[in-house]
Amino acid sequence: MIENENQNLWSASFESIVNQRRSVRKFHPEDYDPAAVTESLRRAQLAPNSSNMQLWEFYRVSDSSSLKAMGEACLGQNTAMTAREMVVVVVRPDLWRQRAQANYDHVKNVHGDRPSFRGQSALDYYGKLMPLLYNNDVLGIRGFFKKMYVTFLGLKRPMVRQVTGTDVRIVVHKSAALAAQTFMLSMVAEGHDTCPVEGFDSVRVKKILQLPSRAEINMVITCGKRIPEGIYGDRFRVPSEWVVK
Ligand SMILES: Cc1cc2nc3c(=O)[nH]c(=O)nc-3n(C[C@H](O)[C@H](O)[C@H](O)COP(=O)(O)O)c2cc1C
């Protein structure tokens, strides 16, 4: 339970951070502290994520030749060409075995050799259910049969329907985007700015980062400190009534 006084402080701080965060398209050429990224990446890893599988990676790009290559791969956009550093948020559905095992071992550590009902459920979750969800073939044959199975079960009771390889890709991208947003809000708290970028050539970005074929780029985040011309105008949002139902 947060004390009332702290509650007001937290609310005011969060309001300021949300208002201050803007997509910045031109960064200051000198003023920059990479420690802000270190701290914000630590916080990003605390973001909620599906089944705690943490199928994400964060690549820091800061040397000038890689920044230049990345700027070009980001289609020469101003935000990319002036960034002091970039963080590339990558999803790694191919690492599901490693991450499921890490969770399994963690549960085993916490619950010991004679786990409670909850402990055993968690072990089954990482030992049986996660392999069922994440082990998909390129042709999507397993996914097809899984989909048929849950559709059948779903006739009788509520079922999770998102079980195919494509569904899993969406799952990992959702979690990565939450980490990206946590990172960007934290950068504001550290007195810095960012811009999320999806206008990039994913083939070239993967080549620059030497990523394996099954890795996917979730987002490139440019980092630095804003200059006034870096904000392209006042914020515009459609009316709340259109989106809050
Ligand atoms: C997934 C995603 C991709 C984006 N890609 C780009 C981009 O390639 N280039 C760019 O300048 N801004 C990009 N943006 C920033 C949006 O244009 C911006 O968030 C939106 O206009 C709202 O402005 P604000 O962030 O300042 O509130 C992207 C934002 C998101 C969430």
Image (cartoon, grey):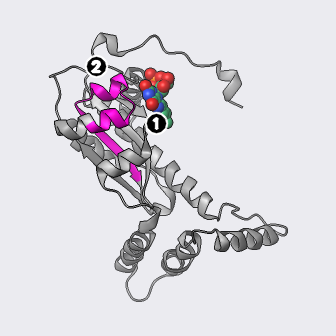
Locate the C terminus and report the quarter of the image it occupies: top right
**192 in the magenta segment:** no
Quadrant in the picture for the N terminus: top left
- Residue 45 vs residue 137, the one in the foreground: 137
Query: Horizontal placement of 147 versus 82: left or right?
Result: right
Residue 218: tell me if it is visible: no
Amino acid type, label 2: Arg
The answer to whether residue 114 is visible is: yes
Q: Give the crowd class for mark 1: few <14, some 14-19, many >=20 residues within 10 Å.
A: few
Give the magenta-colored segment's residue range. 69-90
Q: How many marks?
A: 2
The residue at 72%/68% (across/down) is 147
Of residues 236 and 144, the one drawn nearer to the viewer in this rendering:
144
Q: Relative to 36, say whether 215 is above or below.
A: below
Asked whether the residues under the numbered discs 1 and 2 touch, taking CB atoms below 8 Å apart as contact, a structural biologist would say no
What residue did someone put label 2 on?
226
Residue 85 within the magenta-colored segment of the rendering: yes
Using the image, determine if residue 59 lies above or below residue 229: below
Q: How far across and down, in percent of the image, does residue 141 sit? A: 67, 73
Q: Residue at x 44, y 72 (%)?
A: 100
162 above or below 178? Answer: below
Q: What residue would you read off at disc 1?
A: 198
